[in-house]
Image (cartoon, rainbow, N blue to C red):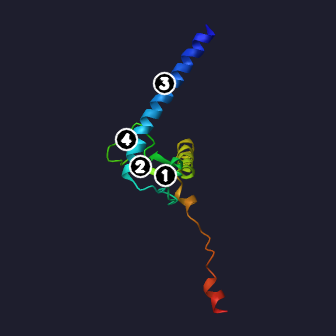
Amino acid sequence: MSSDKNKRLDDIVAQSKKYQAEREGTYRERALKLYPWICGRCSREFTRANLPELTVHHRDHNHDNNPANGSNWELLCLYCHDNEHSRYIDQVRYGGSVDESQAKSTHNPFSDLADLLKK
């Protein structure tokens, strides 16, 4: 009985991976044709040699939202893409709004710069 459950689970996982690969193949190829091979965050340029390190990021984080004009995509390197998803997870987990009173800085490191330059 346990081996039947394991086989069924393995089949579900394999099917899910197959669907994901098919879905990614279509929008990735379209995005690479639409956009220059440059990371949208760090501006790193890519060639055919390192193209697997350039990923397609869904701006609304919905991998099923793939408009033909590519308006929901941006090309990001692996590192920037990972950072974007980490920030999104933090936003979901801890909330997206920041208290304005905490966000403002009161320290000005250059407040005495004019006096120092006069000396």
Q: Which residue is mark 4?
A: 66
Residue 72 in sight from this viewpoint: no
Front residue of 57/119: it is 57
Q: Which residue is mark 1?
A: 48
Q: Are marks 4 and 2 in contact (CB under 8 Å)?
A: no
Mark 2 residue type:
Leu
Q: Residues within 10 Å of mark 2 (few under 14, many from 20)?
A: some
User: Mark 4 against mark 2, which lies toward the viewer?
Assistant: 2
Q: CA distance from mark 4 to mark 2?
A: 13 Å
Q: Is residue 68 left or right of residue 109?
A: left
User: Mark 1 against mark 4, which lies toward the viewer?
Assistant: 1
Q: Are marks 1 and 4 in contact (CB under 8 Å)?
A: no
User: Mark 3 against mark 1, which lies toward the viewer?
Assistant: 1
User: Mark 2 against mark 3, which lies toward the viewer?
Assistant: 2
Closer to the chain start, of discs 2 and 1, is: 2
Mark 4 residue type:
Asn
Mark 3 residue type:
Gln
Q: Residue at x 38, y 39 (%)?
A: 65
